[in-house]
Amino acid sequence: MLGHLVTGMFSHPNEAWFLYDEVRSGAVHCEDAPAVDWDTVRGFAWTVRTTLNQHLSLTSRQNIGRRAVLLMTLDQHHDQTPLVAWLRVNRGPIWSDYLGGTAERSGGEASFNRGARGSVTAVGAPDP
């Protein structure tokens, strides 16, 4: 949602999210980090930097100073339903555990196109 609001597209979420989940779980349980190749490390680092830059851009542009306001902005955006629907359809059932009932209430249509390098572009422009 964050990338969509800032740029009108978002990166393929599977690798970053599930790698983050493994790393976080390992850290919490004092386990070793998962073994990954350097391309994965570079991609993950790029995703973290990009996400941080998008966070700073959106919070600056919309004068958001509190985490709760940022989360509300992301959760209540009118494109959340089609984004979640797209994710459920195109990224598999593994997301059902994480998403729970999110966006099922509206049954939104997924209207996004796959772009180069795994990016996904919305069929509309991001909000200003």
Image (tube, rainbow, N blue to C red):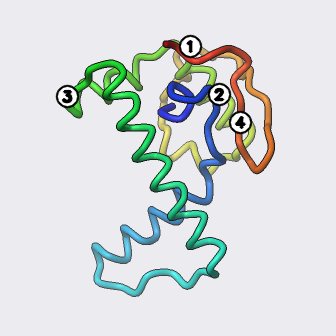
Amino acid type of disc 1?
Ser
Q: CA distance from mark 4 to mark 1?
A: 21 Å
Please state if 36 lies on the left or on the right of 109 as rendered. left
Q: Where does label 2 land, which residue? A: 85
Q: Where does label 3 land, which residue? A: 65
Q: Where does label 1 land, which residue? A: 106
Q: CA distance from mark 3 to mark 4?
A: 28 Å
Q: Quadrant of the rendered structure where residue 58 is?
A: top left
Q: Position of residue 42 (x, y in %)?
A: 58, 69
Q: Where is 33 relative to 111, above or below?
A: below
Q: Residue at x 62, y 53 (%)?
A: 14
Q: Position of residue 99 (x, y in %)?
A: 49, 38
Q: Where is 107 relative to 119, above or below?
A: above
Q: Secondary structure at mark 1?
A: loop
Q: CA distance from mark 3 to mark 2?
A: 29 Å
Q: Where does label 4 land, which residue? A: 120
Amino acid type of disc 2?
Ala
Q: Quadrant of the rendered structure where residue 56 is?
A: top left
Q: CA distance from mark 1 to mark 3?
A: 29 Å
